[in-house]
Image: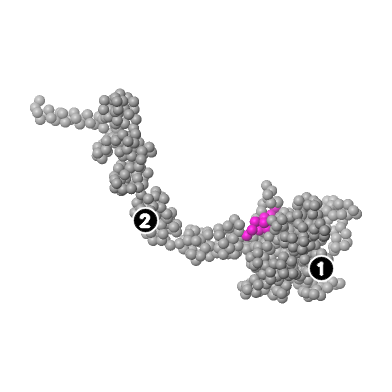
Amino acid sequence: MGRFAGGLLLAALASLTFAACSTEDVDDAAKDAIPSGNPNGKDDGSACAKGFDCKSGVCTSGACAVPTSSDGVRNGQETGLDCGGPDAPTCAGGQPCKVDSDCTSNECTGGKCAGSPTAPPATSTDGIKNGDETDIDCGGTKTNAPRCGTDKGCNVADDCESKVCSASKKCAAPSATDKVQNGDETDVDCGGASTGAPRCAAGKGCVAHSDCASDGCDVQKKCAVSRSCTQTNGGLTCGSGEVGAANAKHESCCIALPIPGSATRLDKYKTTAGRMRAFIERVNGNVLGWYEATKGTLSQTARDQIEPFKTNLPSDLKSYPLGANYQLGGLSILPDRPSTSQGCYVGNAGDQANGAHTYWTDTLMGEDRPFDQAFLDRLPLNCVPYPLAAAFCAWDGGRLQTWEENSAAFGPGNYPWGNAPVAGGFSEVNGMWTQVGPAHVVEGQGIAPCPGCDITRMNWASNYQNPPGGVPAKEWDYAYFISAPGRFPADVGAGGHMDLGGIMMELTASPGVTYPGEPGTDPKYGAMVRWSRAGSWEVHQVNYTRWQFAVMTKYGKTGMRCARD
């Protein structure tokens, strides 16, 4: 065989030998000039004469060694020389890679780590657009860079502070119409001030009252239905079941529902003491000052209800006798109408007068109460004179209801649910505690026993007590007879309005009606207003149409609710 032919044969044999022990990884390693293990070599621990005999590419003391990140060979799951993969350090620029996390720069492009071999790791403060940043030190996820500001580069919405990446791959400025929450908006395209967004609707997020259309941001940082329901007690505690009970189903006490046959909405629940407290605290007791400053923004109807009687509005909390705490507490402004105490003053051990005003006034007038503010705030407000009730409704975005509106919600029957079943309660009859029914027409004519009357229908005549039996050590406080709104789900009218038949009567803005034998005006205040057809926890007749008293009358068995046009 000639020299030329012999040379060809040796070259061919060499080629066959290389192919027999080569793989694509080895080719890559050769191309990158990186010493690599032999995938076709022997397992770790096997006898060897040289590194190429081993899968690890490392032969130590005649045995194949376990791969390490410092053995000078690309082996194990490394993508580069002693780097990359899950077990070795990240690779410098130019080293082979499979995913971004293999690289110090956090960027693997075309199988190579981005950056120079000597470049430091990409960070969000290095003044360079690197890693997967979409602009200098912003965007992306690999360097923990912040989101990019307006007009900076972006790939997706999450790259941008505004959460809006335009079609031109630039971060857009926040706006009130971009359908995302950005700028200082407190919910999607509402709240805040920076984007010019409108105020948020009920249930949307907020951080301040001014974020909400209702001007009320509640304790859950959600916009309230109206501004008087921002607190928990008396704001979010209306409905069935007591607070803390497993079966409780509570909601906002400010919900308003249409009156059947009318576009006017009437509050679903009687106004709570907590709602009045929200008003008094927001205006710091100066109801008259609030009215004079804002009356130009109120509806004409609301102004007409307040203006003739505004001199009776409180200007502070504690001025006697018209300060807010006195008007809502135990003070009797008209002590002879409808009773000498009006059922409002709550006594103490030395003066055991029985009363039950639900607005917490601490120890004003020396009252000693077993119930705290949180408990009382959940209850329907009582002992409130008409001018203050009308002012509250106006502040809360409505006006005081009329007798006709309340009556339409009550319905044509003897009760809000119709004529049957007949509601009942308990009272003393001939010295015995007896189940009774609302059989009397006016007070003083007695109460008939009624063993078959339904005591679950509504709060009437001592059939509700929380806690049962009250607090015997302070038995002069009757607030335990007064249920929070909605606790009697069966006392509901056709429009869904609750407690129309029971708990307590309600003030209205309708003028008094002249009845034979009854005064048509009050000798001191002149104007008389009608009370609703509801009965009360103290056995007042249900569906009685002739309750009417002077505008400054307070009564422990009379509350209120608002209407909204």
Is residue 1 shown left or right of residue 61? left
Find the distance from the CA under tag 1 to the CA under tag 2: 77 Å
Is residue 236 part of the magenta span, yes or no?
Answer: yes
Q: Residues within 10 Å of mark 1 (few under 14, many from 20)?
A: some
Quadrant where the C terminus sits is bottom right
The region drawn magenta spans 230-240
Q: Dots 1 and 2: beta carbons under 8 Å?
A: no
Mark 1: amino acid: Pro
Residue 192 visible in image? yes
Image quadrant of residue 458?
Answer: bottom right
Q: Which residue is mark 1?
A: 335
Disc 1 or disc 2, which is closer to the eye? 1
Between disc 1 and disc 2, whose residue precedes? 2
Q: Is residue 60 above or below residue 312?
A: above
Q: Which residue is denoted by mark 2 in the rendering?
A: 135
Bin the neighbour count of mark 2 within 10 Å (Cα to Cα): few under 14, some 14-19, many 20 and up.
many
- The type of colouring in the image is one colour
Residue at 41% over, 52% down: 145
> What is the residue that sits farthest to the left in this orientation?
2
Q: Residue at x 31, y 39 (%)?
A: 80
Q: Secondary structure at mark 2?
A: loop
Q: Amino acid at mark 2?
A: Asp
Tell me the residue at 88%/54% (across/down).
429
Q: Give the percent coordinates (x, y) of residue 163.
A: 45, 57
* Element type at mark 1: loop
In this rendering, position of residue 93 left or right of residue 204: left
